[in-house]
Amino acid sequence: MKEPIEFKLSGDRAFSEREKAINQLYNRRYFGEVVNGKLFLSLIEAAYLMERGKIKVLDGGKELSFEELFELGRKKDDQFDIKYLVYKDLRDRGYIVKSALKFGSHFRVYRRGMDEHSQWLIWVVPENLRFSANDITARVRVAHGVRKNMVMAVVDEDNDVVYYKIEWVKF
């Protein structure tokens, strides 16, 4: 087994300056984003890669366990658990998953490489969430405006994920 790539915790992200990280994780699998020669991962991406033994994350020289990193994610985002489940499910299915905060959703999803536009915007919700029709309408409008499909990922109490595509219907 290959030695995990070392990342350092920085706020709500982890980063590595190692060229190996950029080559193996970004150039080949599209994890994170490269800024000024450093690969930055969200905590969800870092947790996913850590769970698979691909990286280790240090906080001030101390190596974090998966549980410690996950708990940090929970402290920063009360929906970290369900977002992680959806992220993991999509990545395990072979999709490329990136943040979609600027589109008012949680993730944007690519079928193949980053050479093409993402196809879907994913809004992650627990099954017991109460929301209005306006919540859905606003997200569908944004998705339509950027030529993407709006998908609601509903996570039930058993941590199963069901995906619902939401779209305009014209009569």
Image: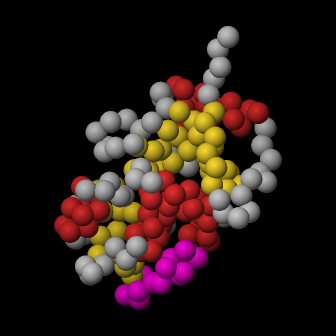
Please say whether residue 101 is visible from this viewpoint. Answer: no
Is residue 51 positioned above or below 38 on the image? below
The quarter in which the C terminus is drawn is top right
Residue visible at 35% across and 58% down in the picture: 31
Residue visible at 66% across and 63% down in the picture: 159
Please say whether residue 23 is visible from this viewpoint. Answer: yes
- Residue 46 percent coordinates (x, y): 43, 68
Is residue 128 positioned above or below 78 on the image? above
Of 71 and 157, nearer the camera is: 157
- Residue 151 percent coordinates (x, y): 59, 40
On the image, which quarter does residue 79 sit in? bottom right
- Residue 138 percent coordinates (x, y): 66, 32
Judge left or right: residue 37 versus residue 52: left
Q: Which residues are magenta?
A: 59-71
Judge left or right: residue 116 versus residue 74: left
Judge left or right: residue 6 versus residue 70: left
- Residue 49 percent coordinates (x, y): 40, 69
Residue visible at 49% across and 53% down in the picture: 90
Residue visible at 34% across and 43% down in the picture: 112
On the image, which quarter does residue 9 sit in? bottom left
Coloration mode: secondary structure
Is residue 32 positioned above or below 147 on the image? below
Magenta segment includes 68: yes
The quarter in which the N terminus is drawn is bottom left
Magenta segment includes 128: no
